[in-house]
Structure formats: structure tokens, C-alpha cells
Image: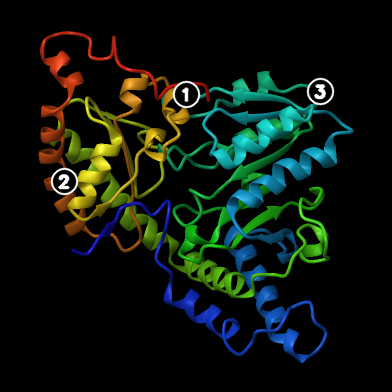
């Protein structure tokens, strides 16, 4: 059985153009781009070209604004830790949203252990950060704000331009994790007003192991990796030339094809949001109803466990995800779902689909047919559903062992 990938947030197929771009640097053009001799020439040209291609995708203004890293997590760490260390003489207060990806939350909390003060800003029931609430949270000593462009878990797109404007009015720099957004919606970092913006190559059907950080002129993070002059001294280490070349090629394709990709994905996710609640009772759609990523569908299907849904769907040939962090064996409910006000019991019933540019109506139709029988079977085994049918509160005595402290 061929697996249908409805989990593009975690992995995407490689574009043919990206594969073609990387192959010479896995075979004949194996030189180091820092070498002055002939073997370094084409690798160096490939890195320079990719920097220009990624800059054009983001409307960065200059290729010099792009720093290549290995992952989006590394890029976000460089932005948070590097900028915080560079600006600590001005203040030590940092603001992030409560629904950030762990690659932002964890470095922010690590900085708090080093003497910085951290504010985790709450969100509304749709996962939106309010510019007014951000304004209230900022202080004279605030040096950095980091709010994701869009949530990989609930699909909500933030009002980044408005939020960045508030941060700048208080003299703080603004970083945004764009991993979930790039490749789904247009990204113009100059219009958004971000000082730093991070994303991964697989967001645009490039290879794993390559990512980029945009840095506005004047944003100068302290390097996290020392020992070389690569990336203008911001990230030491021999460049991953095959991955970078492939990322650049993917960026060029994405810049050209994004309108078509977005329209196709939006039509499919809109169908899911309309038809699945008609086929299933006790369904809670999560994320903003309108300000959301095309191709993103997130829902809590009450009285069943997210992990069980994933396993049953996998048996039917669908690769999906769950916002329930219990599926990651962390024994904690999703911090995102709790932040938008869901009860921990409902948070355990999360299902997240991220469709791709090649997803089809036939695949979505089959999914809509396959899911209801799975839910019926799981609910037949669910003690929560049994309590609900008896007229009891199913969550009153729900085991909260997955809740814990974030």
C-alpha cells in the first residue's frame, strides 16, 4: 500500500530540481568553497547562487542578509541566543509567545537560566497574539521578541507586521520562526518588518540538513559556533554545499510556483474543514478559521487518543500527526492546545494534517471516508465516550498524567 503523506510539516519529498542541483557536489565537484584553488570555485559559486535564490524568495533585499545553517532549530537558536548575547548591554528582557515551537521556547528558557528575564505571552482561543497585549508586555529593558509566523500545529497565521511594529516602537528586535509558513504563503521579510527570520529547506521541498536565517542589516548575533570564517563569521564550519545548492534551487521553484501550490492546498484543507465535521460528531476545529495556512487541517476529535488515531490511519495508508505530545513520549499534553484553552482531555484527541503541493482531491475524499469508521471503533473502546453517553462529564476524572509542567 502506497502511503499518502498528510504530514508535510515533518517531511516533504525532494523536488527534482533540488536533487539535480545537489548531485554535482556529491560527485565531481567535491571541493571546499573556502579553498582558493580550482576545486573550490564551483562549490563557492553554488553557495553564492543559493544565497541569492533564498534572498529573492524572502524579498530580503540583499543576498548578504542570508546565513545558512543546518536546521531551522539552529537558525532560531542563533537568532535568539546570538541576538540576546549581542544586546545584553541594553537589557535582558525577552518576549516569546506561549505557542512557539520548542526550537524557540527552549533556547528562550535556556537564556532565562543564564540571567535573562523571559515573558511567555498568552494567545486567544484561535492562537493569535494580540499586538495590544504585546505592547503591554514590553519594557524599556526588552531587547528581543520572537513570535512564529504561523503555527505548525494549529495553522494560525500571526499578524507579524503589526507585532514587529510594536516591538520596534519599544526599541526591541523582532524574530519570527517561518518554518511552517514558507512554502505555503508568500513571505516578504521587508514588508513584515522582521529583524530575523528562520526556516528550513524542507519547507520548500528541499533537503533536510539545510536551513537559513535572514538577518536585517544591523542585526548582528553573536556566533554560537566558533572556529571558522564561514557565513561571514556568524556560523563556523564547512558549508553543506549539496544541501545549500538544493535549497537554493527549491527556493527558486517555490518563488515561481507558490501561488498555484497555495490555491490547491487551500481548496483541499477547506474541504476537510467543511466535510469532516458533517461526518463526525464532537469535533473541535482548532486554529483561526480564516487566518490560517493553506493545506493545514487541525482538529480535536473528542473521546479518542491522538496516538491511536495515527496508528489506525497509518494502517489505512495515511501518514498524519497529532498535537498531543504524548505521541512523542514526553508524557505532556501539547502546550499549544493548552495555551488556546483546551482541556487536557480534549488536547489528547488532536489530529493534524499538513497537505502538500501534490495532494489530491481523491486522497482527501478517501481520507474523509476512512476516518469516521476508525473513530467509531475507537470510541467503542473509550471510557471517556462511555461516560459521555451516560450523561457524565467525561473529563472530570480524566487521567491528567500527560499534563505535567511544560
Q: Is residue 165 visible?
A: no
Residue 214 screen position, x and y as percent: 68, 54
Q: Quadrant of the N terminus?
A: bottom left
Q: Residues within 10 Å of mark 3 (few under 14, many from 20)?
A: few
Q: CA distance from mark 3 to mark 2?
A: 52 Å
Residue visible at 73% across and 33% down in the picture: 111
Say whether marks 1 and 2 touch (CB < 8 Å): no
Q: Which SS class for mark 2?
A: helix
Q: Residue 339: which disc?
A: 1
| Residue at image coords 72%, 63% | 62
How was the colour assigned to the protein in this rendering? rainbow
Q: Circle 1 — which element?
A: helix
Labels 3, 2: front one: 2
Query: Counting residues from the N terminus, which is met first, the one under dot 1 or under dot 3?
Result: 3
Q: Which mark is residue 368?
A: 2
In the structure shown, which secondary structural element does the residue marked by tag 3 occupy? Answer: loop
**Percent position (x, y) of residue 305?**
27, 31
Of residues 346 and 291, the one drawn nearer to the viewer in this rendering: 346
Q: Which residue is mark 3?
A: 140
Give residue 273's quadrant in the image: top left
Label 2 Cα neighbours within 10 Å, binned few <14 / some 14-19 / many ≥20 = some
Amino acid at each position: 500500500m502506497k502511503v499518502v503523506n498528510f504530514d508535510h510539516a515533518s517531511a516533504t519529498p525532494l523536488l527534482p530540481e533540488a536533487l539535480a542541483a545537489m548531485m554535482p557536489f556529491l560527485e565531481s565537484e567535491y571541493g571546499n568553497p573556502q579553498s582558493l584553488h580550482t576545486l573550490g570555485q564551483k562549490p563557492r559559486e553554488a553557495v553564492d547562487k543559493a544565497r541569492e535564490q533564498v534572498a529573492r524568495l524572502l524579498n530580503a533585499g540583499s543576498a548578504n542578509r542570508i546565513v545558512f545553517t543546518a536546521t531551522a532549530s539552529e537558525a532560531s537558536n542563533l537568532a535568539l541566543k546570538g541576538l540576546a548575547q549581542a544586546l545584553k548591554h541594553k537589557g535582558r528582557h525577552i518576549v516569546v509567545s506561549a505557542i512557539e515551537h520548542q526550537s524557540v521556547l527552549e533556547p528562550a528558557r535556556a537564556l532565562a537560566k543564564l540571567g535573562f528575564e523571559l515573558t511567555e505571552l498568552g494567545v486567544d482561543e484561535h492562537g493569535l497574539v494580540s499586538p495590544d497585549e504585546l505592547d503591554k508586555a514590553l519594557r524599556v529593558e526588552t531587547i528581543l521578541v520572537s513570535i512564529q509566523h504561523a503555527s505548525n500545529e494549529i495553522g494560525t497565521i500571526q499578524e507579524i507586521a503589526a507585532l514587529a511594529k510594536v516591538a520596534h516602537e519599544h526599541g526591541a528586535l523582532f524574530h519570527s520562526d517561518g518554518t511552517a509558513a514558507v512554502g505555503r504563503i508568500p513571505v516578504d521579510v521587508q514588508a513584515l518588518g522582521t529583524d530575523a527570520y528562520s526556516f528550513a529547506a524542507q519547507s520548500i521541498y528541499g533537503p533536510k540538513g539545510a536551513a537559513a536565517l535572514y538577518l536585517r542589516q544591523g542585526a548582528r548575533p553573536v556566533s554560537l559556533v566558533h572556529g571558522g570564517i564561514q557565513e561571514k563569521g556568524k556560523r563556523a564550519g564547512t558549508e553543506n554545499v549539496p544541501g545549500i545548492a538544493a535549497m537554493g534551487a527549491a527556493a527558486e521553484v517555490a518563488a515561481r510556483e507558490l501561488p498555484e501550490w497555495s490555491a490547491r492546498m487551500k481548496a483541499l484543507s477547506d474541504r476537510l474543514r467543511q466535510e469532516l465535521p458533517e461526518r463526525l460528531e464532537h469535533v473541535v476545529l482548532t486554529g483561526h478559521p480564516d487566518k490560517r495556512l493553506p493545506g493545514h487541517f487541525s482538529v480535536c476529535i473528542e473521546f479518542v487518543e491522538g496516538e491511536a488515531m495515527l496508528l489506525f490511519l497509518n494502517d489505512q495508508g495515511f501518514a498524519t500527526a497529532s498535537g498531543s505530545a504524548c505521541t512523542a513520549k514526553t508524557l505532556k499534553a501539547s502546550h499549544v492546545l493548552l495555551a488556546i484553552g483546551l482541556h487536557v482531555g480534549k488536547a489528547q484527541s488532536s489530529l493534524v494534517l499538513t497537505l502538500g503541493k501534490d495532494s489530491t482531491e481523491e486522497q482527501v475524499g478517501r481520507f474523509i471516508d476512512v476516518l469516521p469508521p476508525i473513530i467509531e471503533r475507537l470510541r467503542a473502546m473509550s471510557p471517556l465516550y462511555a461516560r459521555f453517553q451516560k450523561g457524565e462529564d467525561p473529563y472530570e476524572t480524566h487521567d491528567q498524567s500527560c499534563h505535567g509542567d511544560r
